[in-house]
């Protein structure tokens, strides 16, 4: 069995590849290795993966559909796809909006077309908690309407869900979208909170804390996210639907921690683990930001057995240990 993982050199993609390789799967990874953040970090992840058996890498931009068509014809044995490549980041979508339509819409369409040709048994793709946008009801449920995105990033992720539903309806592609909630951990992205805060504390720089610290997030440790992603990959919607031909084989799940953390508690925990005080600069909330994200994971637990196990203290300790080692702090 061969699994395609897009965004293999990315944070979540790297960890998903690791888990699948550990259980003996054959993995084909693709990534365009763009410079949205430090390419050296991506290359270090890729070096780790390439040292293992059963891993093959292609440098490909998924938004280049001609390149993707050639890749598919050379790899017709792929039967499952974990599509984790995307242009991430809410705030960057205000700076470079075309990067989002290219990677998240054109790129997602290329993957859907690839799955159509490959006749895959299951496509699992990354969505985001950002799709809940201006929703006021908490916790966020997959039953909630998601018609009011407050960032272009969120709009593109919601578009991915709608496109996937359409391809499931038209071509019977079993597909599942995972709405990730604030993922952190070793090998994390430099543009995310744990990394930004830790780097600033180590370097004794100011930390910008938006909305004056009045924020809540479902900080979710990477190992828990990977467990949910792999469990989902193993459970196509058709299995849950009892292969009813009248049902569209498409589902969406929340993948997040089952409790929200105050942002200031997150920073305080990080300070204690590092052993240095943070120099905090409070600022107003940024355009596109959401004040609170809390996930309802009842359906995810029911269908996939997903239940996060890692608390903030343990997760941040693991992250800081990796950070010290990788950056020789």
Image: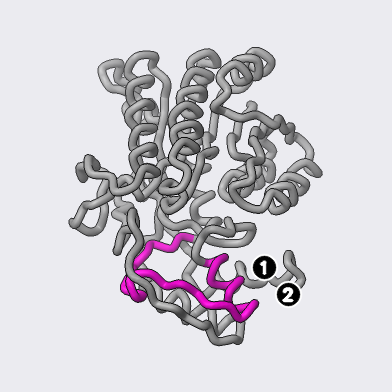
- The Cα atoms of the two marked residues, 1 and 2, are separated by 8 Å
State which region is magenta.
194-220
Quadrant where the image shows the N terminus: top right
Foreground residue, 222 or 158?
Answer: 158
Q: Quadrant of residue 323?
A: bottom right
At x 61% / y 22%, what residue is drawn?
78
Residue 323 numbered mark, or none = 1
Res 264 seen here = yes
Residue 169 numbered mark, or none = none
Q: Position of residue 16 (x, y in %)?
A: 59, 45
Quadrant where the image shows the C terminus: bottom right
Q: Name the residue tied to disc 2.
A: 329
Foreground residue, 48 or 243?
Answer: 48
Q: As drawn, is 327 to the left or to the right of 16?
A: right
Instruction: Tell me the SS state at disc 1.
Output: helix
Q: Position of residue 326 (x, y in %)?
A: 73, 64
Instruction: Tell me the SS state at disc 2.
Output: loop
- Residue at the farthest front position: 95
């Amino acid at each position: 069995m061969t699994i395609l993982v897009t965004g293999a050199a990315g944070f979540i993609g790297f960890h998903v590849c690791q888990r699948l390789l550990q259980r003996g799967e054959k993995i084909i990874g693709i990534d365009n290795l763009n410079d949205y953040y430090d390419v050296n970090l991506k290359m270090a992840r890729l070096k780790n993966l390439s040292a293992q058996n059963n891993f093959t890498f292609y440098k490909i931009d998924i938004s280049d559909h001609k390149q993707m068509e050639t890749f598919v014809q050379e790899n017709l044995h792929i039967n499952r796809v974990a599509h984790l490549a995307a242009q991430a980041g809410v705030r960057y979508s205000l700076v470079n909006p075309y990067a989002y339509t290219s990677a998240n819409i054109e790129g997602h369409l290329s993957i859907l077309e690839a799955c159509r040709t490959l006749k895959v048994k299951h496509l699992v793709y990354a969505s985001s908690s950002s799709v809940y946008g201006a929703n006021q009801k908490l916790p966020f449920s997959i039953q909630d309407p998601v018609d009011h995105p407050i960032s272009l990033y969120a709009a593109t992720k919601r578009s991915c869900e709608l496109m996937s539903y359409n391809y499931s309806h038209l071509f019977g592609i079993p597909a599942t979208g995972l709405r990730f909630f604030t993922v952190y951990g070793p090998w994390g992205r430099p543009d995310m909170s744990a990394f930004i805060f830790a780097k600033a504390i180590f370097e004794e720089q100011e930390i910008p804390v938006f909305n004056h610290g009045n924020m809540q997030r479902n900080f979710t440790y990477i190992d828990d996210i990977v467990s949910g992603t792999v469990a989902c990959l193993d459970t196509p919607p058709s299995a849950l639907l009892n292969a009813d031909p009248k049902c569209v084989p498409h589902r969406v799940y929340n993948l997040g921690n089952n409790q929200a953390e105050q942002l200031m508690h997150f920073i305080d925990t990080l300070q204690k683990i590092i052993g240095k005080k943070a120099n905090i600069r409070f600022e107003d909330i940024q355009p596109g930001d959401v004040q609170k994200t809390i996930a309802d994971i009842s359906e995810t637990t029911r269908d996939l057995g997903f239940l996060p196990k890692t608390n903030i203290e343990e997760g941040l300790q693991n992250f800081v240990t990796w950070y010290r080692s990788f950056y020789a702090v």
